[in-house]
Image (cartoon, rainbow, N blue to C red):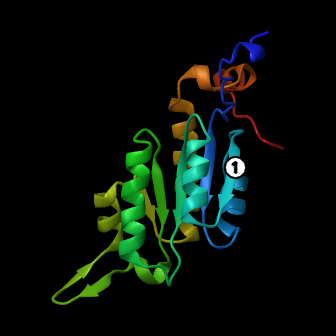
Amino acid sequence: MAASSGCPQPVRRDPYAVIVWERHGRWADLLRRLTNVEVRWYETRGWNECRTSLADVASGCVVLAIGERSSLSERLGQVQQLRRLRTSSPVFVIVPRAMSAGIDDAPRIVRPEWLFREAGATDVVGGAAEANRIARLIERDYRRQSPSTRRLDQLIVDQLPWATSTD
């Protein structure tokens, strides 16, 4: 009866999602294996797809893997836009190892980490060796979300005094 009244139906949104924006699927696969919480994973390959995915979730985070040939200024602007779209969603940036050492900018070396943090990134890592850090930050952000956005069975599991595995 509600459908015939002309009232708009509520939009179904995933309660918590990790949106991984990268050219290949390597980071999404690695983070999925390292993360010990049940979340929805979106693998995106472009800016518009990433923005659309962020709009489709009730809460979540974005992992942006920068390619070696990516335009640094363009990615900085996109991090700023992501933070404006959803201020409560952390943005984690992964820079290539070659770029993490710094960019020669005339008399000084500028580290991309500083630039991305200034643009609004929550954390910046430089390679697969630091993937565990991103996985722990995803878990922490998931747990800080309000209980109303999480399933009852996951709330119960999170309260258990021993560690659970995803096997």
Report the front residue among 72 and 50: 50
Secondary structure beneath dot 1 equals strand
Could you tell me which quadrant the C terminus lies in? top right
Q: Which residue has dot 1 on it?
A: 41
Residue 19 % position (x, y): 61, 52
Could you tell me which quadrant the N terminus lies in? top right
Examine the rendered structure and indicate whether residue 40 appears above or below residue 29.
Answer: above
Report crowding for label 1: few under 14, some 14 to 19, many 20 or more residues within 10 A (C-alpha): some
Residue lying at 44% horizontally and 42% vertically, measured from the top left:
86
Q: Is residue 130 visible?
A: no
Residue 46 % position (x, y): 59, 66
Quadrant position of residue 77: bottom left
Examine the rendered structure and indicate whether residue 66 appears above or below residue 161.
Answer: below
**Count of numbered badges drawn on the protein:** 1
Residue lying at 42% horizontally and 69% vertically, measured from the top left:
75
Examine the rendered structure and indicate whether residue 5 appears above or below residue 101.
Answer: above
Residue lying at 68% horizontally and 72% vertically, measured from the top left:
24
Residue lying at 78% horizontally and 42% vertically, measured from the top left:
166
Q: Is residue 31 visible?
A: yes
**Residue 143 as seen in the image, left or right of residue 24:** left
Report the front residue among 53 and 99: 53
Residue 71 % position (x, y): 43, 79
Residue 99 % position (x, y): 42, 80
Quadrant position of residue 113: bottom left
**Residue 110 as seen in the image, left or right of residue 128:** left
| Amino acid at the residue labelled 1 | Trp
Give the residue furthest to the left: 107
Give the residue furthest to the top: 1
**Residue 2 as seen in the image, left or right of residue 129:** right
Report the front residue among 117 and 19: 19
